[in-house]
Image (cartoon, coloured by chain):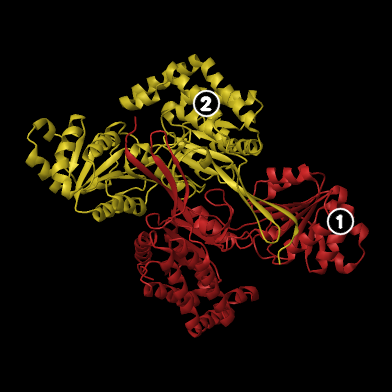
Chain colours: A red, B yellow
C-alpha cells in the first residue's frame, strides 16, 4: 500500500473523533448497535463464508498446520456463536459512568472518581477471526473506539466481518471510526500503530510470544501485555492425591495450547514415591510427555515397568523449566519443601497462574501470600484464569503485567477513571 | 563509570531480591524503618548540608537559575521537613494486603482480589533532593523496592541522603536493595534503566517535559507518565464573576511553575466585555502577562487606558494555545459558547486539569461529562489536583496517562492486585 502511514493516521483520526462521541453515548444506543452487528453477521453468512474459504485455501497452500486452519475456519455454527457473543455483551452491565467513590474534603470540595472509557484501543492479533467480533463488541460496550489489526491469514474474512460490523454501527448513527480494521497485511502497519501515541491510547496484543514481545519492546503507546503462562502446580506433602491427579489432568490436558494450561509439576519429595507413578501413568495414557528431573525419573523407573508408559518419560533439560510448551508436554520436578517450590516458581514462573494442592492451612496461606502471579490457586485448576470463569461475562485477554490490569480482563479493564470535583469557589491556600 | 551496565543490573538484582521480602513485610517493620530513616536524617544534618553546599557551589558555577538553586538548596528547616514527611508516611494506612473484593462462583470457587506491591519501581527525577526522601518513603510503605536516579545537579546531596536512608533500612533488618541510588551522573544510566524489564516493574519519571518524553519514547519498561498540564479555566456566561476572579488568580499566580497551574483562560463572549477588563487589571497588577486573542484584546484596549496594565497585554500567537508556560503568562481567548470552549479544550488540552466557572446546572454537568481529563472542576481552582489536597496523605506524582493511575498518585497507585482463589478440587469443564 502506498502512503501506508497516512492510511493509518487517517484511521487514528477517525477513531479519535469517534471516541469523543462514544465516551458519552448512552447504554441503549451501544446495545442497539451490538444487536445490529449481530443481525448483520447472521444475514450475511454467505459472504463471510465465501471470504473465509479464500483464506482457508490460501492457508492450505501456505501449509498452515491443521490446528491453525481449524482456528481460521468459519462456518454457520461459528457465525451464530459470534452473533450470540454480541448479544451476550449487550446484556452485560455498562461499566461507564459508575462513580466508584466520592468523598468530601474539609474545605467543602466534593471529589468523585468516575469510570470513563480509555479512548482509542488498538488490538493486534493473530489468526482467529472471532477476535474481530469479540474485540469490537467489548470496546464498543465500554465506550471505546477500536482499531483492529488481525493476522494476514484471516485478512479476507476479517475485511468482510469488519465491514459488516462497521456498517451496522453506521446504520445506528454511530460515528464512522467506531470499529475499523487495518485492511492491509503489510507488517509495517503494525510498526506505525505501535508509535501512534497521538491517536491510540492503549494497545493490546493477542497472540504468540513473538507478537507480544514485538509490541512490548517497540511500542511507545502504552501496552497491556497478555499471554505467556509457564504455570506450575505444586503437590504438597499433605495433598489429597486423587484431587491432585484430577486437577493436574484438567490443567494439562483439557486445552494444552492456552496460556492458563499447566506447564510444570512440582511434587513434594515426601509424597513423590507414591504420587509420581500414579500421575505418570494417567498422563502418559492421555498422550502427555513428561520431562522429569533425575530424582523423579528414578522413582518412576523404579516402580513402573509398562513400556507404554515409560516411553512418555524423558529427562528434563534445564531449558524445560522455563518453557511454555503449549502442548501435551509437562516438566516434572521433585522438591524438598514448600520453600523450594516457592523458590522454583519465583525463578521460573511467568507470574500468570500458579496453584498448590494441599490440605495444610499454613501452607495454603503461605502460597497465596508469597507467590507473585496474576492468579494464585489453592486446590483448583489453573485453567480457571479466564474472564468468563471469573464471572466477568467477557474477556479481552489475560494481562500478565502489573500496571492497570492483572489477570483476566473484562469490560472494566477497558476503562479508566477521571476525578470530577464539585466546588463552590474554593481556592488553594 | 566502567561497566555501567553491570553496575545497574546489580542494582536491579538487589532490588528484585529486596522486593520479594518487602512484599510480605508487616506494617510495623515498614514503619520502624521509616522512623529510623527520619532519625538518620536528623542526626546527620551536617553531612547532608556539607554535601549540598558542594552541589550549590557547582550549580552556581554552572549558572543555574535562581529558582533552580532554590530548589536544590538544603538547610536545617528542609531536612526537618523531609524527616517530618517520613513520619507522616509512617502514619498512613498500609495499602498492602487489602482484599478489595471477594466473590463466590457457582462452582464453589471463591475469588478474591488482593492488593499487592508493584515490585521494583524506578524513579527518574530532576533537581530537588527531597524527592529522594519522598519517593523512598512511599515506595517502602507500599512494599516496593526503589531504584532512584536523581538529577546530576543534586548528586552529592542525593548520595549522602540515599546512603542514610539505605543504612537506616539495613539497621532495621530490611534487605540491602530496599532503597538504592544510581550513584553516577552518566546519562547512559537512564537509557539502561529504561530497558531493564527483567528487574524494574514500573518507571515513574518526574521532571520537565524533555525528561518525561525521553522516558515515554524510549522505555520498554511500563511507564507512568506524569506532568504536563496545559490547564484551562472557562468562565461561562452565568459565572459569579467575583468567584471567577478569585479562582483564576489562585490558579495562575499562587504557584505558576507547577503542572496544575492554569495556563489558558476561556471567556464566554456574553460576559467578556464585563469580565476581561476586571481580570486583566487584577492579573497585570500581579505581574501576569496576558496573551490575548484579537476579540479579547479589542475589548481590553477599548476599556482600559492605564499603561501599567496595557503593557501586560500582548497578542496571542497560535502556539500560545498549546504552551504550558509554567510562568506568569496566561493565554486568553473569547469563545462564543460552551461548545466552543469544549472544542478548544479537546483540541489544546493535555488531559490534566480543567475547570468551568458557572452557575448553570446543565453546563456544569456537560463540562464534567464531556471534558476528558484526569481532573475536571466546577467552581474550584485547578491547583487542587494534588495527592494531599485530595486527602491521599501523600503524592508520588500526577499521572496524565489513562492506564493504571490517573491524576494524583498516592500509596494505592503504587500497588497492583492479584487474584487469590480458594478451591476444593474444582476442575474446568
**Disc assigned to residue B86:** 2
- In the displayed structure, A75 sits above or below A419; it is below
**Quadrant housing the N terminus of chain A:** bottom left
B190 relative to A171, above or below: above
- Disc 2: CA contacts within 10 A as few (<14), some (14-19) or many (>=20): many
Q: Position of residue A180 (x, y in %)?
A: 42, 68
Between marks 1 and 2 in the image, the one whose residue lies nearer the viewer: 2
Q: Residue at x 42, y 36 (%)?
A: A105
Q: Is residue A104 above or below residue A71?
A: above
Disc 2 chain ID? B
Q: Is residue B303 left or right of residue B267?
A: left
In front here: A357 or A253? A357
Residue A61 visible within the image: yes
Task: For mark 2, give the secondary structure.
Answer: helix
Q: Which residue is drawn at 27% across and 55% down?
A: B343
Mark identifier at residue B89: none
Q: Position of residue A49 (x, y in %)?
A: 52, 83
Give percent across and percent down for residue B133: 50, 28
- Residue B140: x %, y % from top left: 57, 33
Answer yes or no: do the residues labelled 1 and 2 have beta carbons within 8 Å? no
Q: Could you tell me if residue B75 is visible in this image?
A: no
Residue sitting nearer the eye, B35 or A194: B35
Depth check: give the residue in front, A228 or B141. B141
Identify the element where label 1 is drawn: helix
**Rendered image quadrant of residue A11:** bottom left
Nearer to us in this view, A357 or B133: A357
Q: Mark 1 points at which residue?
A: A275
Residue A113 as seen in the image, left or right of residue A266: left
Q: Distance between the residues labelled 1 and 2?
A: 52 Å
Q: Is disc 2 on the same chain as disc 1?
A: no
Amino acid at each position: 500500500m502506498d502512503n501506508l502511514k497516512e492510511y493509518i493516521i487517517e484511521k487514528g483520526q477517525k477513531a479519535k473523533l469517534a471516541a469523543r462521541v462514544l465516551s458519552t453515548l448512552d447504554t441503549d444506543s451501544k446495545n442497539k448497535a451490538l444487536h445490529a452487528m449481530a443481525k448483520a453477521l447472521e444475514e450475511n453468512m454467505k459472504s463471510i463464508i465465501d471470504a473465509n474459504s479464500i483464506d482457508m485455501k490460501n492457508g492450505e497452500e501456505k501449509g498452515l498446520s491443521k490446528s491453525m486452519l481449524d482456528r481460521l475456519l468459519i462456518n454457520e455454527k461459528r457465525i451464530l456463536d459470534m452473533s450470540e457473543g454480541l448479544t451476550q455483551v449487550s446484556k452485560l452491565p455498562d461499566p461507564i459512568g459508575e462513580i466508584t467513590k466520592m468523598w468530601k474534603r474539609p474545605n467543602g470540595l466534593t471529589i468523585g472518581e468516575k469510570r470513563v472509557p480509555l479512548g482509542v484501543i488498538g488490538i493486534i492479533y493473530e489468526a482467529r477471526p472471532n477476535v474481530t467480533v469479540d474485540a469490537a463488541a467489548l470496546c464498543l460496550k465500554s465506550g471505546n473506539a477500536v482499531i483492529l489489526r488481525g493476522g494476514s491469514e484471516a485478512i479476507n474474512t476479517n475485511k468482510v466481518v469488519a465491514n459488516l460490523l462497521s456498517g451496522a454501527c453506521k446504520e445506528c448513527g454511530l460515528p464512522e471510526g467506531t470499529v475499523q480494521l487495518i485492511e492491509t497485511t503489510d507488517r509495517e502497519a503494525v510498526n506505525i500503530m505501535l508509535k501512534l501515541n497521538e491517536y491510540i491510547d492503549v494497545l493490546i496484543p493477542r497472540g504468540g510470544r513473538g507478537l507480544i514481545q514485538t509490541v512490548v519492546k517497540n511500542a511507545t503507546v502504552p501496552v497491556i501485555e497478555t499471554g505467556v503462562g509457564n504455570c506450575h502446580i505444586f503437590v504438597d506433602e499433605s495433598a489429597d492425591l486423587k484431587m491432585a491427579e484430577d486437577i493436574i489432568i484438567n490443567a494439562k490436558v483439557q486445552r494444552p495450547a492456552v496460556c492458563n494450561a499447566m506447564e510444570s509439576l512440582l511434587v513434594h519429595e515426601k509424597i513423590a514415591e507414591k504420587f509420581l507413578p500414579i500421575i505418570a501413568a494417567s498422563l502418559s495414557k492421555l498422550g502427555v510427555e513428561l520431562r522429569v528431573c533425575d530424582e523423579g525419573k528414578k522413582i518412576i523407573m523404579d516402580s513402573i515397568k509398562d513400556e507404554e508408559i515409560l516411553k512418555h518419560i524423558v529427562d528434563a533439560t534445564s531449558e524445560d523449566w522455563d518453557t511454555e510448551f503449549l502442548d501435551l508436554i509437562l516438566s516434572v520436578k521433585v522438591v524438598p519443601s514448600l520453600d523450594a517450590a516457592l523458590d522454583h516458581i519465583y525463578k521460573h514462573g511467568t507470574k500468570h497462574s500458579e496453584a498448590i494442592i494441599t490440605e495444610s492451612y499454613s501452607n495454603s496461606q503461605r502460597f497465596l501470600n508469597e507467590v507473585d502471579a496474576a492468579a494464585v490457586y489453592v486446590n483448583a485448576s489453573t485453567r480457571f484464569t479466564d474472564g468468563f470463569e471469573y464471572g466477568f461475562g467477557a474477556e479481552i485477554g489475560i494481562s500478565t503485567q502489573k500496571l492497570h490490569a492483572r489477570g483476566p480482563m473484562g469490560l472494566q479493564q477497558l476503562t479508566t477513571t477521571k476525578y470530577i470535583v464539585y466546588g463552590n469557589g474554593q481556592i488553594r491556600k
